[in-house]
Amino acid sequence: MIYLDNAATTPLDDAVLREMLPYLQTEYGNPQSQHAAGRAAAEGLISARDRVAKIFGCRAEEVYFLSGGTEAGNLAVKGVCAAHGSGHLIISAIEHPAVLESARQMQNFGFEVTFVQPDKNGIISPEEVEKAVRPNTVFCAVMAANNEIGAIQPVQKISEICTRYGIFYYCDCVQSVGVVPFPQKASAFAVSAHKFNGPKGVAAMYIKSGSNISPLVSGGMQERGLRGGTVNVASAVGLAAALERAAEGKNNAYILSLRDYFVGRVLSEIHGTVLNGDSVLRVPSNANISFQGCDGANILMCLDLNGICVSTGSACSAGAVTPSHVVTAVAGVERAKSAVRFTFGKHNTRAEADKTVEALKQIVSQIRKR
Ligand code: PLP
């Protein structure tokens, strides 16, 4: 199998698993418990939080462990709305559905939302964000790197604007670990371990102390009362271990050269192809390509039959397939329908890139003949 869907998820590193195992098998206590077993688990959790805080550049009490990037986006949007009761939100139109759908839900509760559109390269302009600011704006979300086209956003500038206006700024850093520095002036940002060779179902979120945000999950006093529920200590430890490795970005150059080699071959050897999103302001792993006259879902299925895993970014709702909202916003619906996302990881090889190009040549020419 050739796995070119590393933006969807990645395999767990052996070293990360080794660090997690004790907390699944021997140090299995509840970190809230007032006995030796609980204390052993609590120590693991404290150490994981410290390790994450060091990489985030914040204090340990500003790090929260959650169930994933989706929960982080929900907590940011809904938690700030719940704390304010009313107001206006600024949301980039290319956010992950965790943020977009949360904002749409908040519209049903009377919140006003401005969706800021990207330019044709998939970049959200800080000027457009500033223009959208109103006296009652309470929240802004612009991600660090987009999950579908890999476009890197000017998040430092956007965080400065939000700081100036006193707006809570949430930066989704799920796809940018090791590539884009964490926006130190943001009110909150989050990473999800399974995107960088850590376990699934765990995220770490920075929330600036003193922020006006209410919990989504009420319960015990875990996570300083902001997120009830027994913390998954093994996963928190796994996240910390994976984050330390990923934050170094030491595989970036290799992944970039592989991605550029692949894109170069596809664009030059298959006519009617175009790269979606900025070619420079882009994470090293991402190649999102439209194949004129083809349906992206068709290419995905044919590649799958050849043992190659990719993605289209289309969403399936109510039995109908809607093309990617991101590629649609950047390049129009026709290019979105014919788009395929290839995301490279440290385990991919040049031979795999070559096999994928050869398979694509055959598949695309067959589809175009139909
Ligand atoms: N944000 C971005 C940019 C993502 O790419 C994803 C996952 O694809 C998420 C949030 C959701 O993360 P999780 O899978 O941990 O819920």
Image (tube, rainbow, N blue to C red):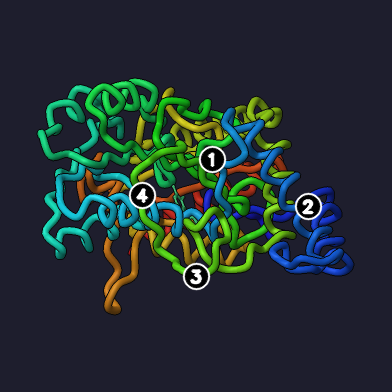
Q: Which residue is mark 4?
A: 213
Q: Which residue is mark 2?
A: 44
Identify the amino acid type marked 1: Glu
Residue at the image position 68 percent from the left and 54 percent from the top: 236
Q: Is residue 250 visible?
A: yes
Q: Measuring from the top left, give residue 86's x and y in whole percent.
A: 15, 52
Q: Which residue is mark 3?
A: 219
Neighbourhood count class around disc 1 (C-alpha, 10 Å): few under 14, some 14–19, many 20 upward: some
| Residue 33, image quadrant | bottom right
Report if the CB atoms under discs 3 and 2 are less than 8 Å apart.
no
Query: As drawn, is 319 to the left or to the right of 28?
Result: left
Provide the secondary structure element on which disc 2 rests.
helix
**Mark 3 or mark 2, whichever is nearer to me:** 3
Q: Measuring from the top left, give residue 350's x and y in whole percent.
A: 69, 38
Q: Which residue is mark 1?
A: 62
- Which one is in front, 112 or 312? 112
Q: CA distance from mark 1 to mark 2?
A: 17 Å
Provide the secondary structure element on which disc 3 rests.
loop
Q: Measuring from the top left, give residue 299's x and y in whole percent.
A: 44, 59
Identify the amino acid type marked 4: Ile
Identify the amino acid type marked 2: Gly
Q: Measuring from the top left, give residue 282's x and y in whole percent.
A: 45, 30
Q: CA distance from mark 3 to mark 2?
A: 22 Å
Image mark count: 4
Q: CA distance from mark 4 to mark 1?
A: 13 Å
Residue at the image position 51 percent from the left and 41 percent from the top: 206
